Image: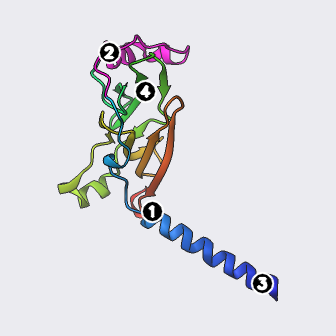
Amino acid sequence: MRVAVGFVFYVCLLGVGLFSQAEKPRPKFSDYPVQDIYRGEPAPPVLSQAQRKFRTMIRRGANFPVQFAGHYTVPRWGCGAGCTYSAIVDSLTGRVHDAPFHVSELPGAWEEKHMNDLPARMEVTPESRLMKINGCPNERDCGFYDYLMIEGKDLRLLRKQVLPKEFQ
């Protein structure tokens, strides 16, 4: 009996935890500020063998002014209708981080319901380590994803909010 009560209590706590995660508001760019924004000459990108397939777009994008997290650019290029590939290039070192996915646009049915408030597929700012993805990573689980750039490492998922099944 004691085990059954404990199990029910655990399941209830798990349900409350999952519900509260879904209801957690999206972070703001100002929640993850950077101290300085690099304004010097960007380092040339150091490409892996796999990244060389997209070398032209990565090199062009690496020459833009800093777009993200104080010293990164985010080159983007198309991968079909409504789809975007990207990379993250460190303007200080030239290190190229692969984006963990390609992103397709939010479903048309969802966009029709929210015509007056459509978010960009990817949102970044030089003053923040926060990256917002609004779309369908790898063409599934459409929704809103918030990532944090961890200095010297990569992106870490902070929060996700998947759209209801009717929009998947």
- Residue 135: percent from left, percent from top: 38, 46
Q: If you read the primary sequence from the N terminus, does the residue marked by circle 4 or circle 2 appear first? A: 2
- Rendered view: 2 above or below 148: below
- Rendered view: 62 above or below 21: above
Q: If you read the primary sequence from the N terminus, does the residue marked by circle 3 or circle 2 appear first? A: 3
Q: If you read the primary sequence from the N terminus, does the residue marked by circle 1 or circle 4 appear first? A: 4
Residue located at (62% from left, 78% from top): 12
**Residue bearing mark 2:** 60
User: Which range is magenta?
Assistant: 37-63
The secondary structure type at the circle numbered 1 is: helix
**Residue bearing mark 3:** 4
**Residue bearing mark 1:** 165
Amino acid type of the residue tagged 2 in the rendering: Arg
**Residue bearing mark 4:** 87
Viewer-nearest residue: 77 or 43:
43
Amino acid type of the residue tagged 3 in the rendering: Ala
Determine the image quadrant of residue 116: bottom left
Amino acid type of the residue tagged 1 in the rendering: Lys
The secondary structure type at the circle numbered 4 is: strand
Q: Nearer the viewer, mark 3 or mark 1?
A: 3
- Residue 2: percent from left, percent from top: 81, 86
Disc 3/disc 2 C-alpha distance (Å): 61 Å
* Residue count near mark 4 (Cα–Cα under 10 Å), binned few <14, some 14–19, many ≥20: many
36 horizontally vs 115: left or right? right
Which quadrant would the C terminus be assigned to in this image?
A: bottom left
Disc 3/disc 4 C-alpha distance (Å): 49 Å
Determine the image quadrant of residue 125: top left
Q: Are marks 2 and 1 in contact (CB under 8 Å)?
A: no
Disc 1/disc 4 C-alpha distance (Å): 29 Å
